[in-house]
Image (cartoon, rainbow, N blue to C red):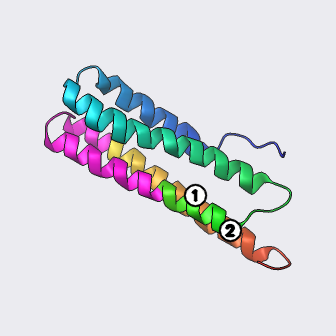
């Protein structure tokens, strides 16, 4: 298996996970379990796993199946939107401060841009490959 380094998006997701975990202890039990843990932290964990999978696939010397990579990138986008939506819900319910919310939204927007960059890059690589697609 080809060696690949941890992508920036993975580090950014880990940082955002840490930020949300910090507000974890100050949140009501209902919001903490039903929204923060299950939806936001769960989505961030899933995104971290997906970024590693995509990074390993793209580093493979055998190439990569575009449909598999596209599916993983679509999942990443869906999780990002999930985090945005549930963060907005927590902010509207006053469980997140406006400052925290704005920083988190900026970070998830940055992560979304990285996902879009990966899509563009990987589709470009795929289109440059010789042979059947």
Kindly tell me whether residue 117 is visible in this rendering: no
Task: Judge left or right: residue 23 versus residue 77.
Answer: left
**Range of residues picked out in magenta:** 77-103
Extreme residue in the top direction? 25
Task: Judge left or right: residue 105 versus residue 99.
Answer: right
- Say which mark, if any, is on residue 72: 1
Position of residue 41 measured from the top left corner of the image (x, y, whole percent): 40, 36
Determine the main secondary structure of the stretch shown in magenta.
helix
Q: Residue at x 43, y 33 (%)?
A: 17
Task: Judge left or right: residue 122 versus residue 117.
Answer: right
Is residue 94 highlighted in magenta? yes
Q: Is residue 18 above or below residue 4?
A: above
**Observer-nearest residue: 18 or 66?**
66
**Observer-nearest residue: 15 or 47?**
47
Kindly tell me whether residue 6 is visible in this rendering: yes
Q: Which residue is mark 2?
A: 66
Q: Is residue 10 above or below residue 128?
A: above
| Mark positioned earlier in the residue sequence (1 or 2) | 2
Indicate the quadrant containing the N terminus: top left, top right, bottom left or bottom right: top right
- Say which mark, if any, is on residue 63: none
Q: Residue at x 22, y 35 (%)?
A: 96
Q: Residues within 10 Å of mark 1 (few under 14, many from 20)?
A: some
Q: Residue at x 61, y 68 (%)?
A: 120
Q: Using the numbered discs, state the Cα–Cα distance from disc 1 to disc 2 in whole angstroms.
A: 10 Å
Q: Are marks 1 and 2 in contact (CB under 8 Å)?
A: no
Counting labels gives 2
Position of residue 33 measured from the top left corner of the image (x, y, whole percent): 28, 30
Task: For mark 2, give the secondary structure.
Answer: helix
The image quarter containing residue 125 is bottom right
Q: Residues within 10 Å of mark 2 (few under 14, many from 20)?
A: some
């Amino acid at each position: 298996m080809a060696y690949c380094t941890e992508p920036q998006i993975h580090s950014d997701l880990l940082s955002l996970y840490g930020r949300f975990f910090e507000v974890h202890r100050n949140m009501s039990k209902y919001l903490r379990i039903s929204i923060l843990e299950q939806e936001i932290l769960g989505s961030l964990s899933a995104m971290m796993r997906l970024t590693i999978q995509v990074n390993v696939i793209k580093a493979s010397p055998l190439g990569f199946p575009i449909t598999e990579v596209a599916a993983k990138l679509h999942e990443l986008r869906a999780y990002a939107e999930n985090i945005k939506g549930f963060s907005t819900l927590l902010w509207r319910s006053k469980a997140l401060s406006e400052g925290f919310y704005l920083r988190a939204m900026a970070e998830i927007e940055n992560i979304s841009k990285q996902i879009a960059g990966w899509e563009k890059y990987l589709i470009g690589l795929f289109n440059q490959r010789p042979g059947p697609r």
